[in-house]
Amino acid sequence: MRSGARILDAKVVIIGAGPAGLTAAYELTKHQFHPLVLEAADKVGGLARTEVYKGYRFDIGGHRFYTKVGEVEQLWHEMLGHDMLQVRRQSRIYYRGRFFNYPIDLANTMVNLGLRESALTVLSYARSQLRPYPREDTFEEWVCNRFGRRLYHAFFQSYTEKIWGIPCNMIQADWAAQRIRGLSLASAITDAFIGGNSVKTLVREFEYPMLGPGMLWERMQQAVERQGGSVELGADVLRLKRDGNRIRSIVVRSNGQESELGGEQFISSMPLADLIFRLAPTPPDEVLRAARALRYRAFILVGLIVKRAAVFPDNWLYVHSPHVQVARIQNFKNWSPAMVPDANKTSVGMEYFCSEGDQLWMEQDSTLVDLAKRDLAALGLATAVEVEDGVVFRQAKAYPVYDRDYREHVRVIRAFLASIENLQTLGRAGMHRYNNQDHSMLAGMLAARRLLGEDHDVWSVNTEKSYLEEQVLS
């Protein structure tokens, strides 16, 4: 936002310029609405933004463009055209000093595990089929029932606990059902034997914007503004003032100044807990307690520039080792060569998961870069001497935690918000749900269409069979 600029009232106010908020805004502009989008950060895209450092582009988290939602796919191509690339997927799991193909390749897995461990793995799987957990309440129970305990320890436990910071027997099975639904050891082995991608969730190719996902959101911002909408950056929503069952106005801080603006309809993609605490007057104590109990994991991406034309052949690696702190490594050059300005060098994204305020989150950038260098060297991917530079990007509230009580907390909050007739929440943060970007975009479309008089349940997105890429471990 320009210094001294005043934000004007709007008929529709959208909080957050991530995939959900921008898609809702764009959908509305196609029906002669002129929405106002308020974004606290200095760029659009939210969790799907692209950061730039010395010409190197870093995708925050790694975003594959694959969907079963035709309208979303059509919108991608409408915005990007020939700038959307087709990328061959290659990812592996690092375990016990070896790299395992993922999706599972039977021969590769047996060679890496050895005959004895392979036999024990098959026996463990058989045991899980004969005596499965009668209830699947936790991530551990869900995975063990489908893969056996031995593969659970090898390919799921370490990585998952790095992400969430809690034991797998404290993570609800909902997360596994969302992220790896439809895949089991039997289905993976069948696919390995007969090929042909018999398991639809094993996605072999995906699309990707030439300059990273931020390219899509920058194009969408331009389209919204071209059609009469407004996207204001650096605009932090401090309070949402309500009168009975309606939001009447919001208080925004921009350039160090506060201003109040009105609106008729409001769409929010800010974290659900933050939204509750910014409502005025404050909600009932029961709702406040539920909001305080919602937990999130933060994310740190350490981008390293390596003086080597090629580091490893994968798009990304899952690191299933307790001996290093890094959980996943992105190789952005293998997503799109245009992400790297110098063909003789490679940029990698070392991903670390933590909680806001903990030791890792509070470390100095230089300390985090040194940690990433050591982890890269420990995995045998590059030496510390080959790393010429590094940069750190932090993302608060990146992952909503699916602990034992989160469903009840969300239920309480949803029930209260349902009483506010001109407010909708959507997106990963706004629904406390592990949505991918296409789900968030679909929710944005549906939220906009509700304002046009159509009847849609935004909360049903990501619970139907239209789920997009069910095999990922992340």
Image (tube, rainbow, N blue to C red):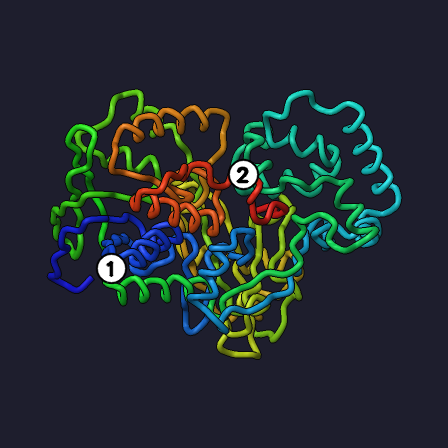
Above/below status of 249 relative to 145: below
When asked about the image quadrant of residue 465, the answer is top right
Residue extending farthest front: 453
Q: Nearer the viewer, residue 163 or 321?
A: 163
Q: Left or right? Give the position of 258 relative to 217.
A: left
Amino acid at dot 1: Gly
Q: Nearer the viewer, residue 405 or 383?
A: 405
Crowding near pointer 2: few (<14 within 10 Å), some, many (20+)? few
Q: Where is residue 131 shown, x and y percent of the image?
A: 77, 23
Which residue carries the number 1 mark? 229
Report the quarter where the N terminus lies.
bottom left
Q: Which mark is residue 464?
A: 2
Above/below status of 43 relative to 345: above
Q: Nearer the viewer, residue 302 or 35?
A: 35
First in residue order: circle 2 vs circle 1: 1
Above/below status of 221 relative to 122: below
Separation (CA) of disc 2 from disc 1: 32 Å
Q: Where is residue 323 shown, x and y percent of the image?
A: 63, 46
Work out whether residue 385 can be spotted.
no
